[in-house]
Structure formats: structure tokens, C-alpha cells
Image: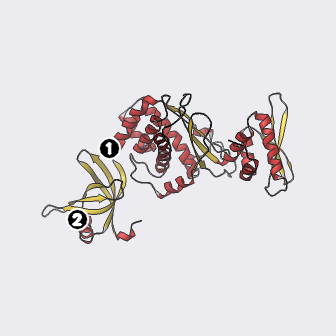
């Protein structure tokens, strides 16, 4: 990647520099008024090295000070200037990397496999994000907040070596003061949504790998409460399948402006062996076809109605237009909801129903109905 000082300087902010330095073990050693801060760190010989970080971007020599900082870091770290600058720019991103064909001599990747890597990387991210909002064995559609999250993701530059997909998730800086009491541990649930997703992504990869090592129906069922889904298993399986004989190498680099908390004990480096692909697929198939989908929402038109003579309850069949492809769902309703279903069918209106979706060889059935609403067709968003 050729180094262009003008491009990179325009992207670097003082907060990025400070976060990068603190994350690398540098500490503040002094200040030059309200113009700049000094950061210091001892080198291998024990000598204190200090660098200058401007506090504001509107100082006249901001660009030259940043260039001097990058040059000193290049000498200190013995890394190329462009890689250091890129790491500083990414200080406010959690960066997830999927590495295919690591260590192989493969020189090209079929276009359809490259598309699989990109599509399934997004699918895996979407599954992790969806699980923050609700836990289900299978997701038919994405929540609006998940769509908003996905729209913020960026794809990083292709890196040298192997074939690497890099997804960058923007994360807000941590501006909260240090907690005064040791027993007041920070909670992941209190983190911004973006950081909740990236930490959940890592925990789900770890759990999927464990299940693939020791498949167990009870463990598989319990994993749903921790955010696992058929969507996640299937995406991870497809990614691993196209990553070569060595399997998929996955890792997360946390945003320097929001350091990860050690108490969370989050693993962020993974190897998913190629031999686990079929087990991952089977786990996904099991969750998709056999596990109930709790508090599922179905939307569509009533296509058939049936109620025995003098019976209070009746059964309808609904063409669920929310799923892709559409599906027909059988729903048993009490007298009140059944009468509303008759009217909706007669007037060609859409109904929205919530309940637990049961799946078996005979079809899909919605039970434990918690909501039933009839809406105008043009109200459907």
C-alpha cells in the first residue's frame, strides 16, 4: 500500500494518536500548555523516548508534528510508516479479519468463493447483532437496528499475504472516568451497541468452535440463550469451507480509543478447522428446522379458515410474506382472534401475529399467541 502523507494526515486526529500510544504502553510525561502533550516510553536499552502529540488540529504546524510523530514511531517500532499510520487511523474501529489460505501457496481465489467470504462475513455480523436484540434459533429477517449497524461497517484495504476480508466497526471513545470502587466492574451490556456486537461475535465464534469439537444436543439448545442461531452456524460453516485446507483464521483487534476490559475475558483469535464444516452445517440445520422460534412475528394474508361446528377455537393458515421465501403457517385461534381473522380474510387485509413458531415434518405452527392485529395493506412498512 503506497504511503501518501496528505491522505493519511487528513484522517488522523489527536484522540487517535493518544489512544494508539496508550494502547502501546506509552504514558503522558508532560504538556506544552494547551498546544501539545508529551508521551514517553523506554526503549530496549532503557532510554526514555518522548514524542509530541498536538492537542488541536488547527495549529499551523499540525501536519509536520504528526509526520514527526510517525517518523519517531517508525524508528521505535521498526515498522513501516504506512502500517503505523493505518493503525492510528483505525484507533476508533474494532477490526475483524478473516484470513483464507493462510500458509498455502494458492495464488488465486474463485470469484464465487470471494463473494461467499464477503456475503457470509456480513451474515455472521448480522447474526451477532440480531442476537443482542433477541435470542432465537433462526432469524427470518433483520431488525431495523441491525440494518443501521451494518450500514456503518467498512471494508478495509486488502492486506498482503493469503486472502483477507477486513471488516471495520466504528466504536465511540470511552469518555467515562475510571470506576472508583474495584467491585464496580464494567458490563458489556452497558457498552455501545457496536462494541456489544463485536464482543458477541467473538463469544459466538468461540462457542460454535466448542460445539463443533463436542456436539451435544443439550449444549446446542443452551447456546440459543447466549445468542447462537442457525444463521451464525451456517455463515461460519460457509466461510470455513472456502478458506482452504487449513480452515479459517479469524481475529479481532479492538479499538484503541475504547480498550477492552480484562474482566470480560474475551478470546479474540480463532482457528476453525476445515474438518468442522459439516458439523457446523448440521448444527445450523438442527436449529433451523427443529428448535421453536420464540416470540416470532409473522405477517401476511389469511388463506384458509376452519372451525368445527359449535367450536370456540378455529384454525387459520397464513401466507407469511415477511419470510423469504414465503411460508404457510398454521395457527389455532380463540374465538375473538378467529372472528378478526374472518374479517381480515373477507376484506383482503394483512394480519400481524406474534407467538412461538414450532417446526416439524408436517409444517410450521404458531402457538402461544401473544399479539394479533389487523392492519391496512398500505400500513405495512
Q: Residue at x 60, y 43 (%)?
A: 95
Number of numbered markers: 2
Q: Where, quadrant-wise, is the N terminus in this rendering?
A: top right
Q: Secondary structure at mark 1?
A: helix
Please give the name of the residue rendered at 80% of the width and 58% of the height, measured from the top-left corner: 58
Q: CA distance from mark 1 to mark 2?
A: 30 Å
Across and down, in percent, residue 323 comes to 36, 55
The residue identified by callout 1 is: 289
Q: Is residue 202 visible from the viewing direction of this image?
A: yes
Q: Nearer the viewer, residue 25 or 12?
A: 12
- In front here: 126 or 315? 126
Q: In the image, what residue occupies the spot 42% across and 33% down?
A: 277
Q: Which is closer to the viewer, label 1 or label 2? A: 1
- Looking at the rendered structure, which numbered label has been put on residue 335? 2
Image position of 281 with respect to 344: above or below? above
In the picture, measured across the screen, residue 148 lies left or right of residue 86, that is: left
Q: Which residue is found at the position 27% from the left and 55% from the top?
A: 328
Left or right: 113, with 337 as reference point:
right
Asked which quadrant contains residue 360, the reply is top left
The x and y percentages for residue 308 are 14, 61
Residue 116, image x and y in percent? 46, 42
Q: Position of residue 15 (x, y in %)?
A: 73, 50
- Residue at disc 2, secondary structure: helix
- Disc 1 or 2, which lies upstream in sequence? 1
Q: Quadrant of the C terminus?
A: bottom left
Vertically, is 343 above or below 327?
below
Amino acid at each position: 500500500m503506497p504511503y501518501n502523507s496528505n491522505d493519511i494526515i487528513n484522517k488522523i486526529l489527536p484522540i487517535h494518536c493518544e489512544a494508539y500510544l496508550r494502547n502501546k504502553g506509552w504514558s503522558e510525561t508532560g504538556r506544552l500548555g494547551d498546544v501539545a502533550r508529551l508521551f514517553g516510553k523506554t526503549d530496549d536499552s532503557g532510554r526514555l523516548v518522548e514524542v509530541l502529540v498536538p492537542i488541536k488540529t488547527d495549529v499551523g504546524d499540525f501536519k509536520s508534528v504528526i509526520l514527526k510523530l510517525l517518523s519517531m514511531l517508525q524508528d521505535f517500532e521498526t515498522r513501516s510508516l504506512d502500517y503505523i499510520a493505518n493503525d492510528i487511523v483505525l484507533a476508533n474501529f474494532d477490526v475483524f479479519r478473516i484470513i483464507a489460505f493462510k500458509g498455502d501457496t494458492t495464488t488465486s481465489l474463485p470469484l464465487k468463493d470471494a463473494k461467499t467470504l464477503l456475503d457470509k462475513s456480513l451474515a455472521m455480523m448480522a447474526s451477532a447483532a440480531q442476537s443482542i436484540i433477541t435470542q432465537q434459533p433462526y432469524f427470518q429477517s433483520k431488525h431495523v437496528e441491525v440494518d443501521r449497524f451494518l450500514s456503518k461497517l467498512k471494508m478495509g484495504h486488502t492486506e498482503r499475504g493469503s486472502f483477507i476480508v477486513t471488516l471495520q466497526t466504528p466504536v465511540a471513545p470511552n469518555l467515562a472516568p475510571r470506576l472508583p470502587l474495584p467491585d464496580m466492574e464494567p458490563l458489556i451490556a452497558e457498552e455501545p451497541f457496536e462494541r456489544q456486537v463485536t464482543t458477541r461475535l467473538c463469544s459466538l465464534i468461540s462457542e460454535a468452535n466448542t460445539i463443533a469439537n463436542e456436539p451435544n444436543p443439550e449444549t446446542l439448545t443452551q447456546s440459543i440463550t447466549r445468542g447462537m442461531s442457525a444463521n451464525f452456524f451456517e455463515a461460519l460453516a460457509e466461510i470455513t469451507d472456502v478458506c482452504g485446507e487449513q480452515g479459517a483464521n479469524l481475529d479481532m483487534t479492538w479499538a484503541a480509543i475504547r480498550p477492552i476490559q480484562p474482566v470480560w475475558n474475551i478470546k479474540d483469535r480463532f482457528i476453525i478447522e476445515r474438518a468442522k464444516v459439516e458439523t457446523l452445517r448440521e448444527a445450523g440445520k438442527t436449529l433451523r428446522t427443529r428448535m421453536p422460534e420464540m416470540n416470532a412475528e409473522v405477517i401476511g394474508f389469511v388463506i384458509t379458515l376452519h372451525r368445527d361446528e359449535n367450536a370456540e377455537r378455529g384454525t387459520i393458515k397464513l401466507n407469511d410474506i415477511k419470510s423469504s421465501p414465503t411460508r404457510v403457517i398454521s395457527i389455532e385461534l380463540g374465538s375473538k382472534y378467529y372472528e378478526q381473522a374472518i374479517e381480515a380474510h373477507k376484506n383482503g387485509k394483512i394480519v400481524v401475529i406474534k407467538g412461538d413458531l414450532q417446526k416439524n415434518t408436517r409444517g410450521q405452527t404458531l402457538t402461544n399467541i401473544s399479539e394479533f392485529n389487523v392492519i391496512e395493506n398500505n400500513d405495512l412498512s
